[in-house]
Amino acid sequence: MKGAVAAMVCAAANFAEDCNREFAGDIYVAGVVHEECFEGVAARAISEKVKPDYVIIGEASQLNIKIGQRGRGEIIIETFGKPCHSANPEKGINAVYKMAQVIEAIRTLKPTHHEILGDGILELTDVKSWPYPGASVVPEYCRATYDRRLLVGETKESVLAPITELLEGMMKKDPQLRVKASYSVGKEICYTGNVIEGERFFPGWLYDEKEEFVQAVYEEIKAMGFNPSITQYNFCTNGSHYAGEANIKTLGIGPSKENLAHTINEYIEIEQLTSVTQCYYGVMKALLK
C-alpha cells in the first residue's frame, strides 16, 4: 500500500497543477492505519470528517477496477464445562469434548451464496482451552474462532442466527452443553498511542459495473491506453466501511498482484507503479467534473 499511497500523492499533485487547482470538489489522500487488523474502523473517522462523494482504494488489482468484495466477520464460539482432576474425568465436564461436538455440527451448516461474490464461507481458524497447560486438569473452558466471509446484505443478526439456532438445539438435547456464539472484539494500540477498538464485523459490498461512476472511470482509463477488467477483490478492504457501512461510491484500483499481499518479499513492479499513477490521474479527471 505504500506504493499506492505514493502514486496517489503524485497523481493528485500533478492533476491539481495541470488544472491550476480549478476542478469540482476537493481531493484528499488518506493513509489509513491498522487496515489489516480492522478493515474500516479507522476509516470511519476519515469519512466522518471528510464526507467524500467517492473513495478510491489502492489495494493491489493489477490496474483493474474493483467494484466489490466479500466482507469479513470473526465469530467466537465458547463452551463452558466443569473442571476436575484428569484422574477422575467423570466428575467434570470436558469443555473441549463439547467443543468438538459443536465444531462437527457447525460443519453441517450450508453456506450462504451470492452469484458474483461466491460462498459466505465459515472456516475454523483456531481452538484454545483453559486452563493451559492443563496439568492434570479437565478443561472447563474452550474457545473456537471462525472466519466468516460476508456477502452483500448480510447483517450481524442474519449471520449469527443459524449458528445460534443450531447451538440452542444442541443444548436442548444435551443438558451438560453450555455454549454461546458472539463476535470477536479487537483492540490495537496505534503508533500515536490511541487505542483502536471494534467488533470484528466488516460488511461486503458490490456495485453494478453499469453504474455511471464506474463507467466514467472505466472509459477514461481506457482512453488513456489501459485495458482494465471490472471485477471484485478476493479479500477484505476498507471498502467494508466506505461502501458497506457508509454507502459511499467506492472503487479499488491498485498496482501489482492481489496474491502478493501480505507475503514475504512483497513487491510492486516499477511499470505498475508508474501506470497506476496515470490511472489515478484518470480517475480524478473522470469524477471531478
Image: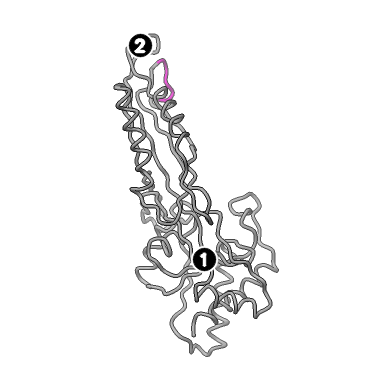
Identify which residue is drawn at 42% across, 20% down: 134
Mark 1 element type: strand
Secondary structure predominantly adopted by residues drawn in magenta: loop
Image location (x, y in percent) of residue 49: 35, 71
Q: Is residue 199 left or right of residue 249?
A: left
Above or below residue 146? Residue 13 is below
Name the residue nearer the viewer: 199 or 119: 119
Q: Position of residue 280 (x, y in %)?
A: 57, 74
Which of the 4 image quadrants contains residue 241? bottom left
- Location of residue 142 in the rendering, given as x and y in whole percent from the top left corner: 39, 29
* Quarter containing the N terminus: bottom right
List the residue tagged with mark 2.
90
Q: Residue furthest top?
A: 87
- For mark 2, give the secondary structure: helix
Amino acid bearing label 1: Ile
Badge 1 vs badge 2, beta-carbon distance below 8 Å? no
In the rendered view, how is the structure colored? one colour
- Which of the numbered marks, if any, corresponds to residue 57? 1
Magenta-drawn segment? 132-136
In primary-sequence order, the first of circles 1 and 2 is 1
